[in-house]
Image: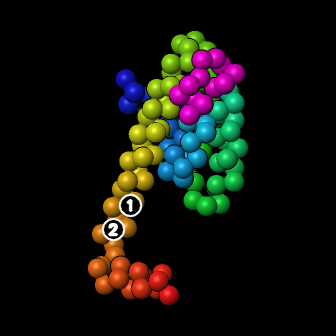
Amino acid sequence: MVKDLSTKYSGIVELLAYLVKERVYGPVDRLARATDLETIYMALYEALRYASTEVRKGLDKIPSDEEIKQFLDEVNRRGASLARRIAIEALTTGLSRESQEKEKEKRGSSPREKTESSDQTKR
């Protein structure tokens, strides 16, 4: 069912996953611990506020107004557990992407490049 949510609310999941990848955990942590609607509203606000500064740096998927409205309406009907499920999906996605980037970096530099880089750091 979590995968269904990540599809239904892909913009929200993508935004939060981006924040996780950038090590901005606050909004995701607040969603994960949310017990009331006000906390969920503030977590989404913080995520969107942060995103407004990150669009210039490569964040290309922002949730639509309609997606945010649908999410908040569904949370209002189903409760805060929906927000926690979205937070878990976003955390998993963001950590996975961060791990993949680190693996690419490791594979991308040869042993010689690593040695040259290490030598420059020592100077």
Q: CA distance from mark 1 to mark 2?
A: 6 Å
- Is residue 32 part of the magenta span, yes or no? yes
Q: Is residue 86 above or below residue 14?
A: above
Say which of 123 and 87 sits in front: 123
Q: Position of residue 117 (x, y in %)?
A: 42, 82
Is residue 50 visible in the rendered image? The answer is: yes
Say which of 101 and 23 sits in front: 23
- Please report the residue visible at 70 percent of the width from the left and 44 percent of the height from the top: 49
- Please report the residue visible at 64 percent of the width from the left and 55 percent of the height from the top: 55
**Labelled pair 1, 2 in contact (Cβ < 8 Å):** yes
On screen, residue 29 versus residue 56, left or right, reads left
Three-letter amino acid code at the position of disc 1: Lys
Which residue position holds label 1?
102
Q: Which residues are magenta?
A: 29-40
Q: Please identify the residue farthest to the front as the structure is shown.
A: 122
Judged from the image, the secondary structure of the residue bearing numbered disc 2 is helix
Per the rendering, the mark at residue 106 is: 2
Instruction: Give the quarter of the image for residue 110.
Output: bottom left
Q: Position of residue 10 (x, y in %)?
A: 49, 37
Is residue 73 visible in the rendered image? The answer is: no
On screen, residue 19 versus residue 49, left or right, reads left
Instruction: Give the quarter of the image for residue 44.
Output: top right
